[in-house]
Image: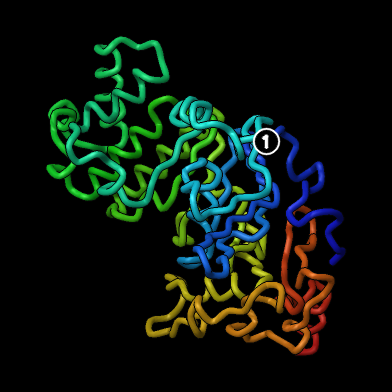
Amino acid sequence: MSPLTGSIGATPPADVRTTTPVLEVDELAVTFKRKGEQGTRAVDGVSFAVAPGETIGLVGESGCGKSVTSLAVMGLLPTRGVQVTGSVRLDGRELLGAGDRELRRLRGADMAMIFQDPLSSLNPTVKIGTQVTEVLLEHTEMSKKEAVEKAVDLLDRVGIPDPVRRLGEYPHQLSGGMRQRALIAMSLACSPRLLIADEPTTALDVTIQAQILELLRELVVDSGTALVMITHDLGVVAGLCDRVHVMYAGKIIETADRHDLFARPRQPYTGGLLGSVPRLDTGRGTPLHPIRGSARDTIAWEQGCAFAPRCDNAEDDCLTEVSGSIVPLEYDGPGRELRCRHPIEYPSAADATATGAAR
């Protein structure tokens, strides 16, 4: 395993990413501050990129920094009490430090976000039809009649029955699942270049969830949209994402192709996440293997590996500061990166053959 040259999350080899990315995030850090108190670092040096037609996943427990990362990319964090540093580029344009007018022009048209809680994201005093059509009227040259027709089509595509009637209803008249689907329709209205989906299927049953994931997949394939999927549902990741970034305590600790990650997780935290998921191919009554402790059982990255207090592979050197940054992200094969001193090891093909022969 050779060390990564340059900054954490630097551009991988040419065979891994050959298309100019739509979104480039470089050393993004978000610190929340209160007067008279020490700041809290919610996102700590996160770097990734997503190309047209590519879907990446940001995975981790609640509180690991996934949603804060997405809000920073969209420019939706409050200006007071929050410090955001690093770089966020959309099609080469720097977004950090951009004015409100420019960001409003980009949101909804070039980049959009599906929020996790539709009840707080939709205006309770405005009809669904108005909230969907205003996106089209603001960012396209459609007439009001054309916008209404498009809105009906969008609601129908996301699985809302009787879409014409639903346009005239208020959010409280829709079920939780319908509200989420209406929010997704608003996000897809202008076929944005970048779509960030923050737990978009949380409130939906499995049938509608499958429809929504298929709709997102079609959007990526047909229009070349770059999709960032934020989720804790590894089943969603397995069926949708091309590459996966696993986050813990504000940092990316493992990056891999979806198939590689599920077949051979290297970071013990990633292995713990996969071991906590029930499997259909195991016998009835097979116990799960949850990660011990909680996300609060952590230490600062400046002091050591934040996951060390919960890690079964932890050694003394996991609590040792090295050159100001413990356990730098390293390449672990083409397109794969890892932040761990004592990763999960797997027998090589030669070892497995020798073991089989000995038996």
Q: In percent of the image, x 71 and y 33: which residue is there?
A: 19
Judge by depth and name the residue closer to the eye, 182 or 358: 182
Residue lying farthest to the front in this orientation: 36
Determine whether, in the image, residue 2 is placed left or right of residue 140: right
Q: How many dots with numbers? A: 1
Task: Classify the position of the C terminus by image quarter.
Answer: bottom right
Find disc 1 in the rendering and name its residue.
Answer: 21
Q: Is residue 115 visible?
A: yes
111 up-or-down from 252: above or below: above
Asked where in the image residue 18 lies, by quadrant, the reply is top right
Determine whether, in the image, residue 108 is placed left or right of residue 208: right
Task: Classify the position of the N terminus by image quarter.
Answer: bottom right
Q: In percent of the image, x 64 and y 68: which residue is there?
A: 265
Q: In percent of the image, x 54 and y 30: which residue is there?
A: 193
Judge by depth and name the residue closer to the eye, 30 or 305: 30
127 up-or-down from 342: above or below: above
Q: How is the image coloured?
A: rainbow
Q: Is residue 222 visible?
A: no
Determine whether, in the image, residue 269 is placed left or right of residue 86: left
x and y percentages locating residue 353 in the rendered image: 79, 77
x and y percentages locating residue 329 in the rendered image: 75, 63
Asked where in the image residue 96 lies, by quadrant, the reply is top right
x and y percentages locating residue 358 in the rendered image: 80, 89
Q: Looking at numbered disc 1 in the image, what kind of residue is underneath it? A: Pro
Q: Residues within 10 Å of mark 1 (few under 14, many from 20)?
A: some
Judge by depth and name the residue closer to the eye, 63 or 278: 63
Q: Secondary structure at mark 1?
A: loop
